[in-house]
Image: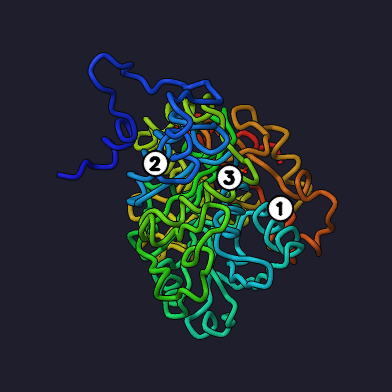
Amino acid sequence: MEQKLGTKCVQAGYTPKSGEPRVLPIIQSTTYKYDTSEDMARLFDLEASGYFYTRLANPTCDSVAQKLCALEGGTAAMLLSSGQAANFFAVFNIANAGDHVIASNSIYGGTFNLFAVTMKKMGIEFTFISPDSTEEELDKAFRPNTKAVFGETIANPALTVLDIELFAKVAHKHGVPLIVDNTFATPVNCRPIEWGADIVTHSTTKYLDGHATSVGGAIVDGGKFDWFKYADKFPGLTTPDDSYHGITYAEKFGLGGAFITKCVAQLMRDFGSSPSAFNAFLLNLGMETLHVRMPKHCANAQKVAEFLESHEKVSWVRYCGLKSDKYYALGQKYLPNGSCGVLSFGVKGGRKAAEEFMKHLRLAAIVTHVADARTCILHPASSTHRQMTDEELLECGVSPDLMRLSVGIEDADDIIADIDNALGKI
Ligand SMILES: *Cc1c(COP(=O)(O)O)cnc(C)c1O
């Protein structure tokens, strides 16, 4: 019988043999010893699997990647040093200079900048579309050189919910994979591969770590996309790689292993965004309680969202667990057990009132982080977006009064009392 999610959170990825450490060991070694040069040569040629240099692979990191792979229902996975690296690698693994990618315009600001500015300089063009696009609108965005579609299950910070099934259907109709950043939902609340997504990415910095100790990223391959069926679109996977003696990834490693093997063998080798074994160890500790923490984050956020919605000084609340929310129906479909702990809201009185409100919070800390055990809050208009005028803020979907609240796993009564007190001061 396949193990359930909670069991995988605790146990997947590492199974010690008799006499070995019960807890995942930190292999703090850059290098690995072999008896003969021939043994090592087989690894360099990708003829045997094993470790030779931690920039490419490390046993501690691999165990944690295998845990995430099991949770997402994938066939192969890798850890990276950040979520930014994960999204860059996931797209760049199949899109080259001269190619085109379609992305939801409701995505993390760092990812938007990576795509719209930095990858554009590398010759890859992006079309940004609304996550609410219809099938016809999506169809129109495709070009002959389109190589992927990208979106976030729950967007940071807009909190839109992606219609994964629709996006996957349209991507597949046009012969390209759907890449979904599943950071906010985590595999406990949504497994995009089950809805048709092909590649899943994560900023493990958020709920997977859950304690704000380590920046990290991950890529998981669902293993179902048929690269050979669209061989001319994906030559990197379906034609020989000269830098590895002419092996063809999709042939040698199959549909389940090709994407991740190529990503490690080429991109990790050349860019080196490798996670540290110690950070992977901390990430694993966090993931051991993911299935316990996520329901608590969701239950607390639901209570806080309902409290805010009923408060006279609050002008609006966005949380897909609220019946009044635009994404309630999609949330019920894709996130029936809860979405995440992040919500956003505005107070009457705009930017000034929001700044005043924040001053009076005691339990909720003002930080640029989200999605860890401690409740925290950010007012973009006075911090990350402070150089913008009210008009400019509205253009990028951030109202001057918007506050992003990441509800932690403290007692909900204390979180609400803190907010209630601060609201009383404005
Ligand atoms: C934070 C975040 C990222 C970037 O991840 P880092 O670990 O900070 O590099 C990417 N996508 C989403 C949805 C995020 O929330």
User: Which of 305/161 is in front?
Assistant: 161
User: Which of 279/241 is in front?
Assistant: 241
Helix or strand or loop: what does disc 1 sit on?
loop
* Residue 82, quarter of picture: top right
**Residue 390: x, y in percent?**
81, 59
Helix or strand or loop: what does disc 2 sit on?
loop
Q: Residue at x 60, y 51 (%)?
A: 345
User: Which of 147/322 is in front?
Assistant: 147
User: Which of 232/334 is in front?
Assistant: 232
Is any atom of residue 266 visible in this view?
A: yes
Does 274 appear above or below 73? above
* Mark 2 → mark 1, Cα distance in angstroms: 56 Å
At label 1, the amino acid type is Asp
Mark in front: 3 vs 2: 2
Q: Residue at x 68, y 72 (%)?
A: 98
At label 2, the amino acid type is Ala
Q: Quadrant of the C terminus?
A: top right
Q: Earlier in the sequence, mark 1 or mark 3?
A: 3
Which disc, if any, is residue 268? 3
Mark in front: 2 vs 1: 2
Crowding at mark 2 (Cα within 10 Å: few <14, some 14-19, many 20+): few
At label 3, the amino acid type is Met
Does 197 appear above or below 271? below
Crowding at mark 3 (Cα within 10 Å: few <14, some 14-19, many 20+): many
Helix or strand or loop: what does disc 3 sit on?
helix
Residue picked out by circle 1? 401
Residue picked out by circle 2? 48
